Amino acid sequence: MRWTREEYISLMTFGGSERQMFVELFGPLIGLPEEWRAQGASQDEIDMIAFDWDYVPRIACGGDTGPFGTPDPVTLEDTAEYQLIRDHLGRTTKLPKGRATIALPQDFPVTDMDSWLEIKPYFTYRDERIDWERVEKAREAQKHGVMVTADIPGGFDIPRELMGEVVACLSYYEQPELMADIMQTLTETSLRVLEQISEVVTIDQLAVHEDMAGKSGPLVGPRQVNRWIVPYYRAIWDLLSSRGTRIFQQDSDGNMAPVIDAFIAGGVTVFYPCEPAAGMDVVQLRQRYGQTIAFKGGLDKMALRGTREDIRRELEYKTQPLMQHGGMVFGLDHRIPNGVPIENYRYYVDLGRELLGLPPREPGRMGWQRMA
């Protein structure tokens, strides 16, 4: 079902909703479509549209706050097993074929202040970052219920992408001047871009990608988040929220529990995908935070590899009445994993709809949009 921006914003800000939202956030993992096809799945099922997922149409605001004006990627080596690519940041990356969708960096362009200054122009402001024709298209689309979105670079994600996890984490202590310059650059560029655009169109949702945690917890703690990332978030959020923005969502896998409070202080209003395998239990989080924050995801994707009883147990727990009072988009906590039979997935969809009080699927009623 297609939601309007007004309906979605109301849901995610605890303003009330006539129904629950049931989505597929990310879609199938690489290799799963072939498994499903061998099991008799239709192309519409493989394309996700046969399940009539809820979604809200979105359009980018027309501004670019991330790396800009970077070189085109260059293929260095292409074998039957992998591709070796020099990416837009100058990193050598390796992509195993048939097993991954994200290339793994083999090296990084930034080690110190001098190497950062060489690549810094890709992150500084320039007028070309704003496409005013796209801004106008976003303004017009918003009149018809389309949600206008903006993204900012991750406060941890960008240093990690530029330096690698080890050097980035050590730099908070060993190279604070470097980290300060990176964060100041990200702040100034994002502010200048979004300040101009938000004068013309209301940005409905601000989003940031971090992916800064694993099962054991985040790679940096509340002290680093509060010192280095919260001021960056806060500067952008204070501007946009004063101009009508209602949602600030953060995407990070892993166990983010130790730093949730710090990020709430930075303005974050929605966390996802809330991975149960990493200890992110959305029911316990709702019990702890009430209506302070909203969530997307939270349903254990691995339950779909089990029995129907496993699937029912997971759904009944996560869709309990406590979770059906707004501030929740129900969906799997990441991509649908290999080994999930199509029959299990169909059962998951139909049972989820039943438990959430949604109408049964009907032939011909189709739709899906990646909600991540």
Image: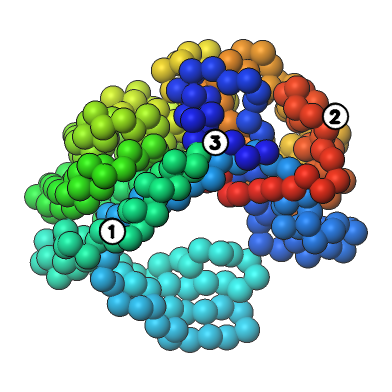
Q: Could you say whether the residue bearing mark 1 is in a helix, strand or loop?
A: helix
How packed mark 2 is, by other alpha carbons closer than 10 Å (few <14, some 14-19, many 20 or more), is: few
State the CA–CA distance, disc 2 to disc 1.
53 Å
Q: Amino acid at mark 3?
A: Thr
Q: Dots 2 and 1: beta carbons under 8 Å?
A: no
Q: Could you say whether the residue bearing mark 3 is in a helix, strand or loop?
A: loop
| Residue appearing at x 43%, y 86% in the figure | 76
| Residue appearing at x 67%, y 13% in the figure | 321
State the CA–CA distance, disc 2 to disc 3.
35 Å
Q: Amino acid at mark 2?
A: Glu
In the depicted structure, whether residue 145 falls above or below residue 366: above
Q: Which mark is residue 309?
A: 2
* Residue 218: quadrant of the picture: top left
Q: Is residue 83 left or right of residue 239?
A: right
Q: Is residue 187 left or right of residue 5?
A: left
Q: Earlier in the sequence, mark 2 or mark 3?
A: 3
Mark 1 lies on residue: 132
